[in-house]
Amino acid sequence: MDNPKLQKLPVINFGKENLQHGTNGWSFARNEVRHALEECGCFLAVYDAVSFKLRDSVFSALEKLFDLPAETKKKNTSDRGLFGYFSIDGDSSNHESMGIENSTDIEEVKKLSKLVWPRGNDDNFSGIIHECANLMSELEEVVIRMVYESYGVEKLKCDSHLDSNMHLLRFNRYISHGVDEKTVSSNAHTDKTFITILTESRENGLEVKLKDGQWVPVDFLPSSFVVMAGEAAMVRPGATAEYNLVFIEF
C-alpha cells in the first residue's frame, strides 16, 4: 500500500458540465472513465448531485433501520440469496447487510418500510432512500453509456442493457470492537455486476486491489463515490478490482 507510483484512485468529475451528452465535457469524462477502468478497474467519482443534506439524511435513516431488533430486520427476505437481510454471525454483532431490490421504484422501497415500520413511523425513510437510489442510478447510467460509447458499441445495445437493469441498493454496517489494529471486515472479492457504486458514512475503510496486486486505501472526497467495474464489465483481462473493508479500530 506504500507504492509511490499509485497512492490514490483516479478522480473523475461528474458535474453538470460533464453530464451533457455531445459536449466537450462529456467526451473528456468518457475518455477518463475508459482509461480508469482499463488501468485500475475503478475510479473515484465526484458527484455533487447527491447533496450533503441528502447524504446525512440517508445515513441517519440507515442508522435507525439497523438499530431495529434483529427479528424485525430478518423480515426482509429475498429469493436472490443475499439481496434481503443478512448477518454474518446471525446476531448482527459484527457485520449485517440490508438490500432493496428495484430500489428506483418507490413502491419497492415502501414495501421494506411498511415491513419494518408497520405503524408508519419511518420518518420519511422511503422518500429519502428512493431519492438516493434514483441519483445513484443516474450516475450508473452515465458511466455505462460512456463505456459503451467509448468502445463504439451502438446505442440500441446500450439502451437494451439499461432497460434490463435491476437496481439493488444494499446497505452494510460493520461494528468496531475497540481493537487498536487493522481489522478486515469483509473478505476481498469482486462483484458479478457490470458496475458497482460504493460510498461510506464516516470511516475511510475501503481498500481496492489493482491489477498489479497493490492494495490502495480509498480516500473519499466530499460528494464522492467509488465506481467499480464488475465481472460483467471485463473491458480487458484484469480490469476488475477486488475490494474489501479494513478498519483501524480505536
Image (cartoon, rainbow, N blue to C red):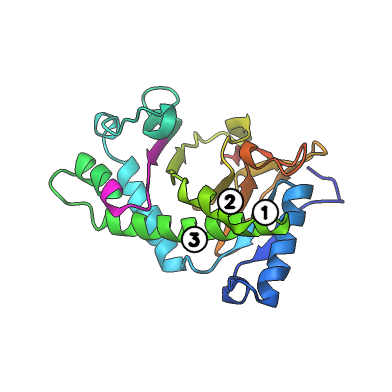
Question: What span is in magenta?
Answer: 97-108
Look at mark 3 in the image and give the residue it sits on.
Answer: 138
Please name the residue shown 56% across and 46% down the image.
196
Q: Is residue 4 left or right of residue 142?
A: right
Return the residue nearer the eye: 166 or 238.
166
Q: Which of marks 3 and 2 is in front?
A: 2
Q: Is there CB contact under 8 Å for labels 3 and 2?
A: no
Q: Where is residue 158 in the image (x, y as percent from the top left)?
A: 58, 53
Tell me if residue 14 comes above or below residue 97 in the rendering: below
Q: Earlier in the sequence, mark 3 or mark 2?
A: 3
Q: Does the magenta stretch include residue 100?
A: yes
Q: What element carries label 3?
A: helix
Mark 3, other Cα within 10 Å: few <14 / some 14–19 / many ≥20: few
Residue type, numbered disc 3? Glu
Q: Is there CB contact under 8 Å for labels 1 and 3?
A: no
User: What quarter of the picture does the C terminus occupy?
Assistant: top right
Q: Give the distance between the C-alpha atoms of the residues marked 1 and 3, in whole angstroms.
A: 20 Å
Tell me if residue 46 comes above or below residue 228 in the rendering: below
Look at mark 2 in the image and give the residue it sits on.
Answer: 157
Q: Where is residue 111 in the image (x, y as percent from the top left)?
A: 24, 44
Look at mark 1 in the image and give the residue it sits on.
Answer: 153
Q: Is mark 2 on a helix, strand or loop?
A: helix
Where is residue 185, by image quadrant? top right
Q: Give the distance between the C-alpha atoms of the residues marked 3 and 2, in whole angstroms.
A: 18 Å
Q: Earlier in the sequence, mark 1 or mark 3?
A: 3
Residue type, numbered disc 2? Lys
Q: What element carries label 1?
A: loop
Please name the residue shown 58% across and 35% down the image.
192
Q: Give the distance between the C-alpha atoms of the residues marked 2 and 1, in whole angstroms.
A: 7 Å
Tell me if residue 107 comes above or below residue 138 in the rendering: above
